[in-house]
Amino acid sequence: MPETAHSISIAGKTIPYKIRVSTRATRLRITVSASGVTVTLPRGVPQREAENFLKQNAVWLNAQLERTARLAKPSPLPADVMLWHGEAVQIQRIEEADRKSRVKVEPSKGRLRVYMPAGSKASTRLAAEAWMRAYARAEIEQVVLEQARRMNAKPKAVSIRDQRTRWGSCSSRGNLAFNWRLVMTPPSVLEYVVVHELAHMFELNHSKDFWDIVARYFPDYKKARTWLRKNASSLRVE
């Protein structure tokens, strides 16, 4: 069904939002993304309930809006530089006359060497990104395996996604999802995010009990969270 545009004033700030009525929805849901705020209503629920729901979740909403705004800022890194395991590396394009269609990427002493066929019109940066995505799956799955064994957790499935506003998630069924950009972070930060999501298998919330579990398996979690906040814009790949 079509979306309708509205706005609400929260803490003196006007926030535009859209209402979407869904025949499949069973409860109200707020979605915050780069394109704005959307409230999904089950069919039959009055539209005024959307405003009430936003007010009830005002603190969470403002936090999500601030987070989305931070991620939307241009990366402070030059176009030919990316983060790899927490370190800034320069993307170096190397064209080879005898290379056919296959692209090869190698990390080497502060660089990501991207070998491409001579005359190729392909983007060097996108080639480096594709390589990182493929690498991310194996690396993240290995960390999940190691930490799950430590925590005696048994996730049902692990998926690697291209998320813009989340580093990871855990469903009520025990399915884990992680942002492939975590390979850009220091190994300790990746480990923290994995521990964080595995902890949700025992506490599907952010209660004191949840943070106690995180602290038990990753005592320095506050330092990792700070790194993610400070470097969020550098982790974006355009």
Image (spheres, rainbow, N blue to C red):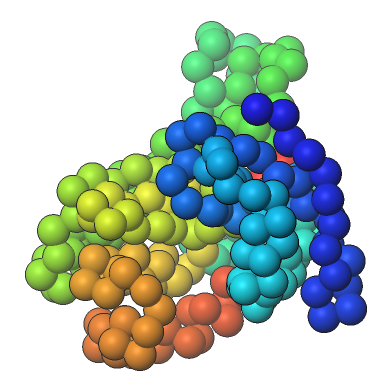
Left or right of residue 77: residue 13: right
Q: Quadrant of the C terminus?
A: top right
- Write the residue at 27% across / 74% down: 203
Q: Is residue 233 visible?
A: no
Q: Position of residue 13 (x, y in %)?
A: 88, 73
Left or right of residue 80: residue 140: left
Q: Position of residue 173 (x, y in %)?
A: 23, 52
Left or right of residue 63: residue 113: left
Q: Position of residue 49 (x, y in %)?
A: 65, 58
Hey, which quadrant is residue 128 in on the image?
top right
- Write the residue at 53% across / 23% down: 103
Q: For this rendering, which residue is in front, 24 or 33?
A: 24
Q: Is residue 197 visible?
A: yes
Q: How many marks?
A: 0
- Write the residue at 14% across / 73% down: 150
Hey, which quadrant is residue 5 in on the image?
top right
Q: For this rendering, which residue is in front, 126 or 177?
A: 177
